[in-house]
């Protein structure tokens, strides 16, 4: 395949894109204003091969990657624009920081997931669930393009005090040796596949030794397949990267790609299809996940089409998430009732091979909570919920009930059903709704 040159379009020169000439002045202005708060970055692959510029600004991939005015409140938008017009750099910096801190930059108690060893916090790791450790390689805390819904936007917003990152591979390895219950290590970000293959290998290859026999699965959370498939085809270290994947398989480990695809159009280019084939030939399995996003994929037919195309390409549909309570949430969120209806209508319209997907799921403070349905029990309309994962693993897969609320978009807006004052997992300090009760120890 002919090499494709990587040309990132970053905020300071987005006006150079000829495609944006078709936008109204207000829409062009919004990219600069909103992009001060929620970071903007795109590249030539997204701009030239994924976005339908005849459908802008309503094109789903444009909305997925380019800031839009409605992603900030009217008051915040006016304040940022005024400071930009006045060229008040200090005032702008302060206002942007103030707005960001009100946008819940670290949702679901992520800071609480950071492990402490001998009084030292490992700020580049999270250990929320017994079997799984998340690792944030410092070299991979960016992406090939930024999603406007991203729940980890502080990673590349210059908010260093809120950033998860570390480059000390030996600390990761020492921590894993002391925690034999850990079976899965998830490399995440940002996007760990923005890292050079040799750097990524320095983290992964030691895990292939016998002393890490308890680590059975290495996961890579990535949007690279959707935003830059040439990473696996023509980048200068593409072959080296595929060789690394092959080493994982040869060592008897499972390599799981957690690939983010938010719309079927991301699956349809020749480049992504060839990249998928090359990754699969290395022995890795690609699982797919996405939040349900208003303006992008808020339709059962889109999800059904996406799952079918994924299966046709050998991918495994894995998660439908509820959009997290952070950043531009108000622009993208739908009610939990709407999310459940979209999921079940899509789910019932596909064959069994697509029904590996779970959802709609909220990655909330106590754990991953799935909306199983809406029903009536003893005359009361309720949500039926369960933990797919939980800080306390003993609570996984136990159904519980919340009072029906047709406007609720997140778990913290729900109340216990049947007149109860707390959910079952809040009783006896099993774990609090906000994840603030007694810590679960993995020692």
Image (cartoon, rainbow, N blue to C red):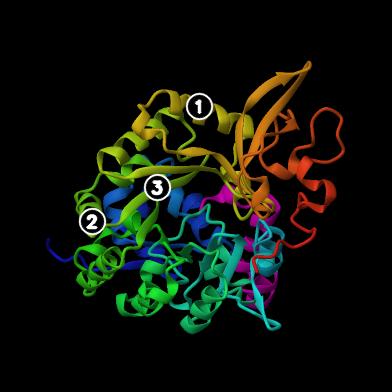
For mark 2, give the secondary structure.
Answer: helix
Q: CA distance from mark 2 to mark 1?
A: 31 Å
In the rendered image of this protein, does residue 19 appear above or below residue 253? above
Quarter of the view holding residue 55: top left
Real-space Cα distance between discs 3 and 1?
18 Å
Q: Is 70 above or below relative to 240?
A: above
Image mark for residue 288:
3
Q: In front: 220, or 301?
A: 220
Name the secondary structure under disc 3. Answer: strand
Q: Position of residue 83 (x, y in %)?
A: 65, 67
Q: Position of residue 42 (x, y in %)?
A: 38, 61
Q: Judge whether residue 86 is colored magenta.
A: yes
| First along the sequence among labels 3 and 1 | 3
Query: Horizontally, is 340 left or right of 406 in the view?
Result: left
Task: Point out the image quarter for the C terminus.
Answer: bottom right
Residue 275 disc label: 2
Main secondary structure of the magenta stretch? helix
Q: Which residues are magenta?
A: 67-94
Q: Mark 2 and 1 residues: CB-CB less than 8 Å, in contact?
A: no
Q: Position of residue 111 (x, y in %)?
A: 67, 67
Question: Does the residue at mark 3 contact the one at mark 1 (Cβ under 8 Å)?
Answer: no
Indicate left or right for 199 with 158 as reference.
Answer: left
Label 1: state its secondary structure.
helix
* Within-10-Å neighbours for mark 1: few <14, some 14–19, many 20+: some
- Is residue 220 visible in this depiction of the protein? yes
Q: Residues within 10 Å of mark 3 (few under 14, many from 20)?
A: many
Residue 284 included in the magenta stretch of the image = no
**Pointers 2 and 3 in contact (C-beta within 8 Å):** no
Give the number of the disc on residue 344: 1
């Amino acid at each position: 395949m002919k090499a494709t040159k990587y040309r990132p379009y970053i905020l300071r020169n987005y006006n150079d894109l000829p495609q944006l000439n078709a936008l109204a002045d207000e829409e062009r202005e919004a990219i600069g204003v909103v992009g001060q708060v929620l970071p903007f970055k795109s590249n030539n692959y997204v701009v030239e091969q994924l976005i339908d510029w005849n459908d802008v600004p309503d094109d789903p991939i444009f909305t997925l990657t380019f800031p839009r005015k409605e992603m900030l409140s009217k008051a915040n938008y006016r304040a940022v624009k005024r400071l930009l017009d006045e060229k008040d750099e200090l005032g702008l910096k302060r206002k942007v920081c103030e707005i960001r801190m009100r946008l819940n930059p670290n949702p679901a108690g992520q800071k609480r997931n950071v492990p402490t060893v001998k009084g030292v916090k490992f700020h580049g790791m999270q250990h929320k669930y017994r079997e799984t450790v998340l690792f944030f390689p410092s070299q991979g805390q960016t992406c090939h393009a930024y999603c406007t819904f991203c729940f980890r936007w502080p990673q590349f917003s210059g908010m260093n005090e809120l950033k998860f990152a570390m480059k000390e591979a030996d600390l990761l390895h020492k921590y894993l040796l002391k925690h034999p219950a850990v079976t899965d290590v998830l490399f995440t970000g940002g996007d760990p596949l923005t890292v050079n293959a040799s750097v990524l290998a320095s983290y992964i290859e030691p895990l292939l030794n016998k002393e890490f026999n308890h680590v059975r699965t290495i996961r890579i959370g990535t949007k690279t397949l959707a935003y830059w498939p040439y990473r696996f085809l023509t980048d200068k270290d593409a072959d080296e990267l595929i060789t690394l994947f092959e080493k994982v398989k040869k060592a008897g480990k499972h390599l799981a790609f957690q690939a983010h695809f938010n719309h079927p159009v991301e699956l349809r280019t020749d480049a992504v299809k060839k990249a998928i084939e090359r990754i699969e030939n290395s022995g890795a399995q690609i699982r797919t996940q996405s939040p349900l996003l208003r303006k992008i994929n808020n339709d059962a037919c889109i999800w059904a089409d996406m799952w079918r195309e994924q299966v046709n390409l050998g991918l495994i549909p894995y998660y439908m998430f509820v959009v997290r309570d952070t950043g531009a949430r108000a622009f993208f969120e739908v009610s939990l009732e709407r999310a459940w209806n979209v999921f079940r209508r899509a789910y019932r319209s596909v064959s069994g091979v697509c029904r590996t997907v779970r959802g709609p799921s909220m990655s909330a403070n106590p754990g991953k909570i799935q909306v199983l349905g809406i029903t009536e029990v003893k005359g009361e309309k309720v949500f039926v919920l369960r933990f797919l994962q939980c800080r306390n693993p003993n609570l996984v897969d136990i159904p519980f009930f919340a009072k029906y609320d047709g406007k609720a978009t997140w778990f913290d807006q729900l109340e216990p059903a049947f007149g109860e004052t707390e959910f079952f997992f809040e009783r006896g300090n099993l774990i609090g709704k906000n994840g603030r009760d007694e810590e679960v120890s993995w020692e």
